[in-house]
Image (cartoon, helix red, strand yellow):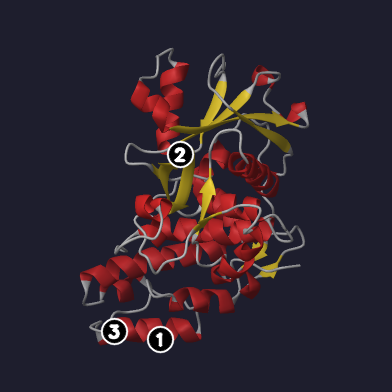
Amino acid sequence: MRDFWLSCGHHLLDRAAGGGLVVTDEFLKVYLARPELAPPPDAAEDERALHAELLVEPRIAVSPKRIAALKDPDARENWQLMLDFRDLLLRHPTLEAAYAALARDGMGNTPPLFINQLVHVILRNALDGCEDAYVLRAAELFFREQRLTIHDQSLIAADEETIAGIGDTPLSPLVSMLGLPAASEIDVLSESNADSYWDRSDQFDMALDLTAGRRGLAALGEVIAVWLYHMLSVEADIEPLTEIRDVNLTWYVGLDAEASKIGDALWGGEELDDAQKARVIGLFRLTFRDPDVVTEQLRGEPIYLLLAMTSDRVLRIKAQNLVTGLPIRRLETVT
């Protein structure tokens, strides 16, 4: 079995009897050592001391008074956010339970970075043993922003962070459209190069074809099914559709903010303009294998999932919408 996404730190976590991930000191220490959490070179001594103590004992109680006493106002805010997040993880039996609590109670002030890192490691757990590079690349959409472009009549998604801040003269039309430098290596995932994904999985440098009717959207449907089973203990079949025509949106879930707006418009009987239609990336029909999990009022009604990009061609999936937005009778998180 090949490993992947080593950067998420899954190998530092324990597993509960139910399959969920249990926080360890090792995981928290690595988390604290991430560049975005380490004190900058010009940090005051009080912040450095706090960081050093937590690296030795990451579960120590830190009083609000100590945070308030930090000289740097930015450090006060950053450390309060960090400690709130740490305490959230420690209050729950598993990372999955912590994420479910965030999804249902609201993300509040939790930084999107922390949310994405949590989804990253939970999906690594849920997809353990997966041997399909298309499914793993599609799963990246759950926790990393994507930049979309049209190339040779195909809709191609590439990692936004990988693209950001790089220039120079590109080697190919696709690299040019995505803004990548000549020195970079980015390929659209295909059957011929899928085997290279395993060595590159932490580089996030493989693009994915999300054209309707192709493997990318089907793989995303498989990821959604895995996520629902792992987080809610429900089995579902997710079928990608090729067009919105004649779709009765009795119940729908927007997989991102843009898709939610479009779904609201369609549900209200509005006609989509050309710009809105162009932003729709995917439409899925969801069918629960056990119809009894659906609330009685909606039993037998179709459930749809919408996926869309912003006007500037960025895709930001909100995985929490799948935890909170479905009409199911019971919500059971892996513990």
Q: Nearer the viewer, residue 85 or 268?
A: 268
Residue under label 1: 52
Q: Residue at x 32, y 85 (%)?
A: 48
Query: At label 1, which amino acid type do we have?
Result: Ala
For residue 46, the mark is: 3
Q: Residue at x 59, y 44 (%)?
A: 216
Residue under label 2: 256
Q: Is residue 127 above or below residue 240?
A: below
Q: CA distance from mark 1 to mark 3?
A: 10 Å
Query: At label 3, which amino acid type do we have?
Result: Asp
Local crowd size for mark 2, using a 10 Å CA cut-off: few (<14), some (14–19), many (≥20): many
Q: Do labels 1 and 3 touch, CB within 8 Å?
A: no
Position of residue 259 in the picture relative to residue 176 (left or right): right
SS type, badge 1: helix
Q: Position of residue 281 (x, y in %)?
A: 48, 35
Q: Is residue 104 visible?
A: yes
Q: Residue at x 69, y 27 (%)?
A: 294
